[in-house]
Image (cartoon, helix red, strand yellow):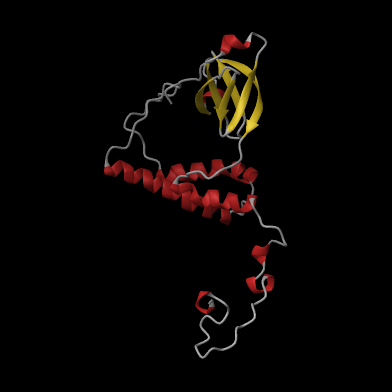
Amino acid sequence: MQELEIPIICANTPQAKGRVEQANQTLQDRLTKEMGVQGISTPEQANSWLPTFIDDYNRRFAILPRRPVDVHRPLGDAEQLDQILRRKAERILSKNLIFQRHRSGYQIQVDRPTHAMRKAKVTVLENSKGEITVLYKNQPLAFVLCSQQADQARVVAAESIDFELLNASKAHKPAPDHPWRFPLYLLNPLPKLLPDRGHSNFGGWGDILTLG
């Protein structure tokens, strides 16, 4: 937003926050139900139907502004939305021109002597598809993936736990012959019962109460 010179106006009153939450509830709940009523099941169908929904939504819920002045401005030639609307991170190159990103190592490929870019600061851009672009002084650099660490336990936000668990369950589906799919008694036959020693059958399967 700062790069596009768009000031952010926060909702600082309960009334304004309530209006925001009501709009979010309408879009998150009623929109998906309306798509089901319309028989929409693909992104292409949703995109073609979306203008109709926007017109109907604005007709019922839009409020005229106090000042009807259009403050929109045209997009400048220097404002490259493809680069601005991305995740951004700054990295410092090592002596081998390597930087780390998402537990992976990337090495910069340059024609100039490597010592000229040691400890240089680069900007890493990542789009919604996970594609990475590396900029040095606003110029793209060639790079290669040189190392990748195994996926380890990590902390995730509370609101994304369901999404992460769903992806994890799909990525690590047990094999058809995995022991997890079979009852324990089919894998390990029951041990031979010890002779009755005059006490109850509790512990009759060779647990710690019958050892001795």
Which quadrant holds residue 141? top right
Which quadrant holds residue 93? top right
Residue with the most extreme left position: 13
Residue 92, percent from left and from top: 52, 20
Residue with the most extreme bottom position: 198
Q: Is residue 73 left or right of residue 96?
A: left
Residue 119, percent from left and from top: 52, 15
Residue at image coords 50%, 78%:
209
Q: Can residue 115 be seen in this view?
A: yes
Residue at image coords 56%, 14%:
118
Q: In this view, does 59 lie to the left or right of 166?
A: left
Q: Nearer the viewer, residue 3 or 75?
A: 3
Which quadrant holds residue 6? top left
Q: Does residue 14 sit above or below 165 in this rendering? A: above
Q: Which of 108 and 31 is in front in this view?
A: 108
Q: Is residue 142 left or right of residue 1?
A: right
